[in-house]
Amino acid sequence: MAAEFSRRTESLLNRADAICEHRGANLTELRRHILGMILDAASPTGAYELLDRLRQTRRGAAPPTIYRTLDFLLEQGLIHRVERLSAFVGCVAGCTVDPDGESHTHAAQFLICRKCGRVAEMQDHDVTSVLARVAKEAGFSISTATIEAEGLCSTCRTAPATRTRSN
Amino acid sequence: MAAEFSRRTESLLNRADAICEHRGANLTELRRHILGMILDAASPTGAYELLDRLRQTRRGAAPPTIYRTLDFLLEQGLIHRVERLSAFVGCVAGCTVDPDGESHTHAAQFLICRKCGRVAEMQDHDVTSVLARVAKEAGFSISTATIEAEGLCSTCRTAPATRTRSN
DNA sequence: CTCGTCATGTTATAGTATTACATATCCCGC
DNA sequence: GCGGGATATGTAATACTATAACATGACGAG
Ligand SMILES: [Zn+2]
Ligand SMILES: [Zn+2]
Ligand SMILES: [Zn+2]
Ligand SMILES: [Zn+2]
């Protein structure tokens, strides 16, 4: 049987099943398994880390196995690529079932904590629209935008200042 | 003698000389040459493309030659890395001479034309501040942000619709 | 002079992603 | 049932991006 994921991941996988079925997209066992690995991770996961884990149950898996699957998941908007990390996170936000249009990505912003490594996804309309407006003023029409901030998440900011040897 | 660059590039190089001298940073001939290649290009340039060109005049140049130089130029804020392209562009905006503080990068946004490949640098305060505000509302404090939009520049939007074989 | 620092040279390797071709599977119309 | 296209995956090789580790050279401070 396939790997077992957290309750939350299973729930998101079920949602993905529904979305793909509705679109006529084929969320195969391989794709579902890799999506599960991504969703189950606390932090963004690199392609070769996914490959290593996949190989534990699927001997002969190779880079194209992973990258093709990632392409599919990206097209379906089920995951995002975090450029600054060359890694992938599950989408937990905008995967509302929309009328089919080939690519289902949505505008998002990512907050990357440089201490704990976690990444939070935001979908803030103001950010998107201000950028679009400013670009338009420069005569530029945006089709997609990468917005990734690095800093400290609330947990790590509040945390007991993990005394950094300051002797 | 070193390669010859456009008048505009030479002007920016002279500005870089002044900035580095003011900071006590050492803009060596190698660093100046690579900065010139980057500034002179119409589009972002990859590290290995720079390496190939550098080898025409400097036999024995190797990846570290390039990457160390890029690190220096990034620290000085003389170039930026465009994450979506894994490539580098010259900074033509915020290189004002500021009090020394190790790293001189500034907040910027990039508009990448998917047709002509050119990249425009913006420094819009609204974009920066809206993102900072929204992140703060999520309890996140930003130290740096990557903002890169892909789309069509004004020239390519206006252009005569380069007939894409639509038979 | 000699030591430390900075800049660069040199070799090797790690990490990320794609190309090209082969195979399997499934659905569909005949 | 069979041929043919579309989709999904297997397999091997390679391209592209980046860093590690150690060596050498230049130069100023003391
Ligand atoms: Zn999302
Ligand atoms: Zn954190
Ligand atoms: Zn700049
Ligand atoms: Zn253009």
Image (cartoon, coloured by chain):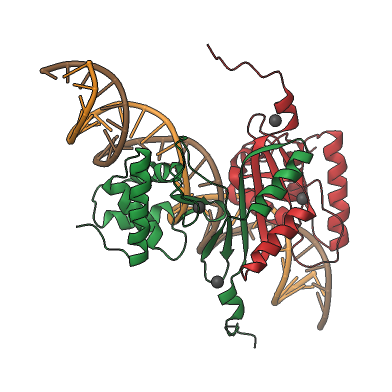
Chain colours: A red, B green, C brown, D orange
Tell me: residue A102, above or below residue B48: below
**A8 left or right of A142?**
right
Quadrant containing ligand 4 reads bottom right
Identify the residue shown where x is 87% and y is 34%.
Answer: A7
| Image position of A99 (left or right of A86) | right
Q: Position of residue A70 (x, y in %)?
A: 67, 51
Q: Quadrant of residue A89?
A: top right
Quarter of the rendering occupied by the N terminus of chain A: top right
Viewer-proximal residue among A167 and A94: A167
Task: Reply above or below: B21 against C23.
Answer: above
Q: Is residue A104 visible?
A: yes
Q: Residue at x 59, y 41 (%)?
A: A48
Q: Residue at x 81, y 34 (%)?
A: A4
Q: Can residue A62 be seen at all in this image of the molecule?
A: no
Indicate whether A75 appears above or below A1.
Answer: below
Residue closest to the far top = A167
Between B92 and A4, which is closer to the camera in this rendering?
B92
Image vertical order of residue B52 relative to residue B100, above or below: below
